[in-house]
Image (cartoon, helix red, strand yellow):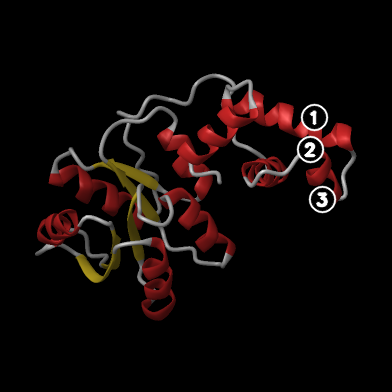
Amino acid sequence: MSEVSAAVLLVDDDSMVRSWVRVALEGTEFDVVGEAANGAEAADLIARRNPGLLLLDYGLGDVVATELLRDLRRDGRDQPAVIMTASPRQGFNEDARDAGAQGTVLKTGRVEELLAALRSVLAGEDAFDGRHPRRAPGRAALSPRERQVLRMVAGGATNREVAAALGLGDETVKTLLGRVFGKLGVRRRAEAVSEGHRLGLI
């Protein structure tokens, strides 16, 4: 057993999963110091308890883990994080890494795999589950400006309204939106919004 120990914040909207993880970590160097069922609870507990390690389910009731983690990173929270998901997803490792995670695990995996991932990230190493297929060619991460445009489009803004709000030219917005389409592998605004939601970009 590693000599390094860590206080873990467990975030999952399924109480049965949280119970399973608690049992899995009993007797190890990992101490579950808090549990949250959604992103708002998680942010509050992180601020109050400052855990050393975050174990986050991807699909929470009020937010997806990648977006929660991006917000935490913007707020200066630098705890290593592992994101859980129920089944393999294309591009999941890249999306998690882009959001600031250090590892991913499958809920269908073995306890030993969960412990190995937590130990790796605690030691400063990455631990991304290789069963997630790689992101499709061309699916590069969106830039902050591209994500901003996508979010405004998701809110119903027209290109002209986006341009006015961001102080950009109409053609610049059109170019940015075209880049978003290309990176997400879509052709239409509605498809971009749907894919943005699926990837936790909105």
Q: Is residue 125 left or right of residue 10?
A: right
- Residue identified by numbered label 1: 175
For image coordinates 81% across by 52% down, the residue present is: 165
Tell me if 136 is positioned left or right of 46 in this view: right
Query: How far is disc 1 from disc 2 in space, using C-alphas?
Result: 10 Å
Identify the residue under disc 2. 159
| Relative side of 47 to 138, left or right | left
Dot placed on the residue nearer the N-terminal end, 1 or 3 = 3
Q: Secondary structure at mark 3?
A: helix
Camera-side residue of 146 and 171: 171
Quarter occupied by the N terminus: bottom left
Q: Secondary structure at mark 1?
A: helix
Q: Amino acid at mark 2?
A: Asn
Pinpoint residue 127: horizontal percent, then vertical percent.
Answer: 35, 43
* Residue drawn at (64%, 47%) of the image: 155
Crowding at dot 1, Cα within 10 Å, few <14 / some 14-19 / many 20+, comes out as few
Q: Residues within 10 Å of mark 2 (few under 14, many from 20)?
A: many
Which SS class for mark 2? helix
Kind of residue indicated by mark 1: Thr
Q: Position of residue 160 (x, y in %)?
A: 83, 40
